[in-house]
Amino acid sequence: MENRLEYATLGGGCFWCLEAVYQEVAGVVGVVSGYAGGEVPDPTYQQVCLGATGHAEVVQITFDPQVVSYRHLLDIFFTIHDPTTLNRQGADIGSQYRSVIFCHSSAQQQIAEETVAELGQAAAWPDPIVTEILPLTKFYPAESYHQNYYRNNPWQPYCLMVVRPKVSKFRSKFGDQP
């Protein structure tokens, strides 16, 4: 039986945070930091940081659905970032830091919409979820120095103050799960 890999593309603030977490998830075979949702072809980090391209910082996750479900990836996503702040995560402000799910299929869109609805009904957050759910049109990998950023720079101040707490939160909630 052929093992078919799938993709998930998620934006929840700085891509370094999401990349560091998803690299630890069983069934995830690759994570690439990049940009999606904008109008400018082949954007650079500097262009995206200015907020003028329309892109969000995202990670594209390659995963084995026989090991980890798309829903589980979304459960992690909604645990490690605040989906109620519009165009912001902590001190990172701008549309490039928005909470967004870029769907690769109608099945992913349905799962994403159901997940957001369930979290809303459960009042999982004190404020309404503002996460966008959109079809993925194009993904652009970020520059090479952004890839494996936390692994390569664990003592960098942003990693210590922002990335590490998200990784710790993930480990405390999901560390014993496959």
Image (cartoon, helix red, strand yellow):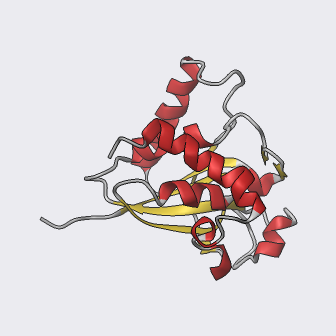
**Residue, x 69% and y 21% (percent of image)?**
126
Q: Quadrant of residue 59?
A: bottom right
Q: Quadrant of residue 42?
A: bottom right
In the shown orientation, is residue 171 left or right of residue 163? Answer: left
Q: Position of residue 100 (x, y in %)?
A: 64, 48
**Residue, x 57% and y 71% (percent of image)?**
148
In the shown orientation, is residue 117 left or right of residue 89? Answer: left
* Residue furthest out toward the left: 1
Q: Quadrant of the N terminus?
A: bottom left
* Residue furthest out toward the top: 122
**Residue, x 63% and y 69% (percent of image)?**
149
Depth check: 9 or 169 in front?
169
Above or below, comparing residue 2 to residue 9 in the picture: below
Observer able to see residue 103: no
Above or below, comparing residue 63 to residue 79 in the picture: below
Depth check: 114 or 163 in front?
163
Q: Position of residue 102 (x, y in %)?
A: 56, 54
Depth check: 154 or 10 in front?
154
Q: Position of residue 119 (x, y in %)?
A: 54, 26
Depth check: 148 or 56 in front?
148
Q: Quadrant of residue 33?
A: bottom right
Observer able to see residue 162: yes
Q: How many numbered marks does the figure carry?
A: 0
Above or below, comparing residue 109 to residue 155 in the picture: above
* Residue furthest out toward the front: 155
Q: Position of residue 79 (x, y in %)?
A: 56, 37
In the shown orientation, is residue 161 left or right of residue 142? Answer: right
